[in-house]
Image: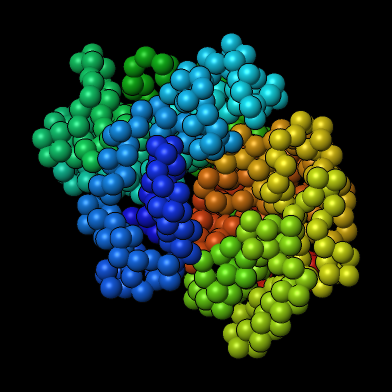
């Protein structure tokens, strides 16, 4: 378990205790444990009870429960509360904008015990009778619920990536064949997945079930498709089989979207290929590279095989030169213990240096972010002094003085010009008053973009994948404004955000807007989220030239000076 997962268990326990009317003092102790554990830098998985009890604010009772989680993956007390609370009530806790007090009121006053019952109540206009609820609140709640139902049984790519890669290795070893590959959405690096899809180059796969690599759920003997689950986590897996001689063809066919396959097989080949029914003899024994070559095409990366008309663009002379993770030379969005990060500034800088990067742009939260220990002016100046000292100590590694400045409701940034000019760069982001219509959200962002001190626009829509849709914006207007005012747009690489969405990267590139792939790291391990940002960037056809993180220290400094 990660430290965040430990912390979340205590947060859930505190909420369930509050829902069940427990003593407020006990509730507070578990809620405090959540906050404390989020800030622990050492892996809780590796700590003894003695070590845990040495953490400030952690006593024997909390320590024992941490040991339970460490040993069993469960906490008895939490499981008991879950068992005594309607399952639908527990589900309601996962819905954004619905706190414990509101859930308790809905439960007690309207006897609502599930998301489905709450959606029905919204449709029947019943929430407006409750204190604290109005027509606007009810409408917002309805949108959140609809998004919740759309997100059920879906997974973040980051949640499944390692499991999927290990499955491929296990199946290869069990069946004694190299002809096993991820395919479909997961091979296209889609950020949201319903299942792991795998192609095997043989039809006899019974050993996979006999060795309990997968558990079979459903199989129609007329089709080479097996619906399975992983034995421990129950993750859905679609296992497809193929003749070995047609593995390359079927891998290509199952990876691309229908429109991609239609363009490839029906148009790109001189003689159209019947790809909807039988294995085409003309492609027997070919791997993907050979099949593309037969259509007079270069190998097309799996992650861009969903872009509309990409085959015709390539036929017309366009050559995708996709960015790679090793191209990144600097980390530009990271937090330290100066605000809400888990590690000190020196720890963050040293770790980034050890990973082989040339520079770190530290961007702690600004003064309006009281919820994140944002920096008042005196602390900004104190942090800058520490950065100067660390730059001497860690040279030639460089720490750039940045800030993640809150975009206020009127679009202004939350420091005066005399402070903003002291930073090397400024990431401008919205963190508060997220309920806006498209016009207001767009105006707010553009006002911030026009600020001469804004260097990078952070997570433009504020979305949290599978949790919060984000505010609606006019993407073209925002990107056009960035082009006019020479503002960089961030791809927030946190796998729960991936914002800017990859589908808007081509338009940004068309307008000459540069992109920053930023991990938004709040811990040492968070630095590695740049990996997910690169995957999203590749889906959007981002190249090395248009990504500012690929610049050397001196090149990035020159870019910042040119902006000023």
**Residue 464: x percent and y percent?**
57, 41
Image side of residue 173 versus residue 84, left or right = left
Name the residue: 69% across, 49% down.
431
Q: Nearer the viewer, residue 223 or 97?
A: 97
Residue located 57% across and 52% down the image: 493
At a point 88% along the width and 59% down the height, the residue shown is: 452
Name the foreground residue: 193 vs 413: 413
**Which image quadrant for residue 267?**
top right
Q: Looking at the image, which residue sits at the far left?
A: 210
Q: Is residue 89 above or below residue 26?
A: above
Q: Which of these two is toward me, 306 or 79?
A: 79
In this picture, is 132 found above or below 40? above
539 vs 107, left or right, is right
Q: Specify the quadrant of the image occupied by residue 43.
A: bottom left
**Quadrant into which the N terminus falls:** bottom left
Residue 513 as seen in the image, left or right of residue 324: right
Answer yes or no: is residue 32 visible.
yes
Could you tell me residue 109's position as x and y percent? 51, 22
Q: Residue at x 47, y 21 (%)?
A: 112
The spot of residue 148 in percent (x, y) is 51, 28
- Count all numbered tags in the image, as a single digit: 0
Q: Is residue 528 left or right of residue 26?
A: right
- Asked whether residue 187 appears in the rendered view, the answer is no
Image coordinates for residue 406, horizontal then vertical, percent? 74, 54
Q: 419 or 426: nearer the eye?
A: 419
- Quadrant placement of the C terminus: bottom right
Q: How is the image coloured?
A: rainbow
């Amino acid at each position: 378990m990660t430290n965040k997962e430990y912390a979340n268990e205590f947060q859930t326990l505190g909420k369930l205790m509050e829902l069940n009317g427990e003593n407020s003092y006990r509730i507070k102790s578990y809620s405090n444990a959540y906050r404390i554990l989020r800030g622990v830098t050492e892996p809780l998985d590796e700590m003894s009870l003695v070590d845990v009890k040495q953490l400030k604010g952690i006593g024997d009772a909390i320590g024992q429960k941490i040991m339970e989680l460490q040993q069993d993956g469960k906490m008895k007390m939490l499981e008991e509360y879950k068992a005594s609370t309607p399952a639908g009530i527990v589900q309601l806790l996962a819905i954004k904008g619905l706190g414990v007090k509101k859930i308790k009121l809905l439960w007690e006053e309207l006897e609502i015990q599930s998301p489905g019952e709450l959606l029905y109540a919204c449709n029947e206009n019943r929430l407006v009778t409750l204190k604290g609820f109005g027509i606007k609140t009810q409408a917002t709640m309805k949108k959140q619920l609809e998004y919740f139902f759309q997100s059920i049984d879906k997974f973040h790519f980051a949640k499944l990536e390692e499991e999927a890669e290990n499955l491929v290795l296990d199946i290869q070893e069990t069946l004694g064949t190299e002809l096993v590959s991820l395919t479909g959405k997961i091979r296209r690096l889609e950020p949201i997945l319903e299942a792991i899809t795998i192609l095997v180059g043989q039809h006899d796969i019974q050993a996979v079930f006999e060795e309990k690599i997968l558990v079979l759920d459903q199989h129609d003997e007329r089709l080479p498709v097996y619906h399975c689950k992983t034995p421990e986590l129950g993750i859905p897996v679609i296992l497809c089989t193929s003749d070995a001689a047609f593995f390359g063809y079927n891998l290509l066919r199952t990876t691309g979207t229908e429109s991609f396959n239609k363009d490839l097989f029906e148009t790109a080949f001189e003689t159209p290929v019947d790809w909807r029914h039988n294995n085409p003899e003309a492609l027997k024994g070919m791997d993907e590279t050979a099949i593309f070559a037969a259509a007079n095409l270069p190998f097309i990366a799996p992650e861009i095989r969903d872009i509309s008309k990409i085959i015709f663009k390539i036929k017309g002379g366009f050559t995708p030169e996709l960015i790679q993770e090793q191209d990144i030379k600097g980390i530009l969005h990271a937090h330290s213990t100066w605000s809400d990060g888990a590690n000190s500034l020196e720890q963050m800088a040293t770790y980034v240096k050890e990973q082989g990067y040339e520079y770190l742009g530290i961007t702690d939260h600004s003064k309006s972010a009281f919820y994140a220990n944002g920096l008042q002016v005196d602390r900004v100046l104190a942090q800058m002094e520490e950065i100067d000292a660390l730059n001497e100590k860690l040279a030639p590694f460089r720490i750039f003085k940045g800030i993640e400045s809150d975009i206020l409701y009127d679009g202004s940034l939350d420091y005066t010009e005399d402070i903003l000019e002291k930073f090397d760069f400024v990431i401008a982001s919205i963190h508060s008053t997220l309920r806006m219509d498209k016009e207001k959200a767009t105006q707010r962002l553009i006002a911030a973009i026009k600020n001469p001190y804004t260097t990078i626009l952070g997570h433009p829509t504020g979305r949290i994948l599978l949790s919060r849709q984000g505010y609606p914006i006019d993407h073209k207007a925002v990107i056009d404004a960035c082009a006019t005012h020479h503002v960089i747009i961030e791809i927030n690489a946190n796998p729960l955000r991936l914002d800017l969405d990859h589908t808007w990267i081509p338009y940004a590139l068309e307008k000459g807007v540069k992109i920053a792939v930023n991990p938004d790291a709040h811990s040492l391990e968070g630095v590695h989220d740049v990996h997910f940002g690169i995957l999203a960037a590749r889906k959007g056809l981002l190249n090395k030239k248009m990504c500012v993180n690929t610049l050397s220290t001196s090149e990035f400094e020159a870019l910042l000076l040119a902006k000023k």
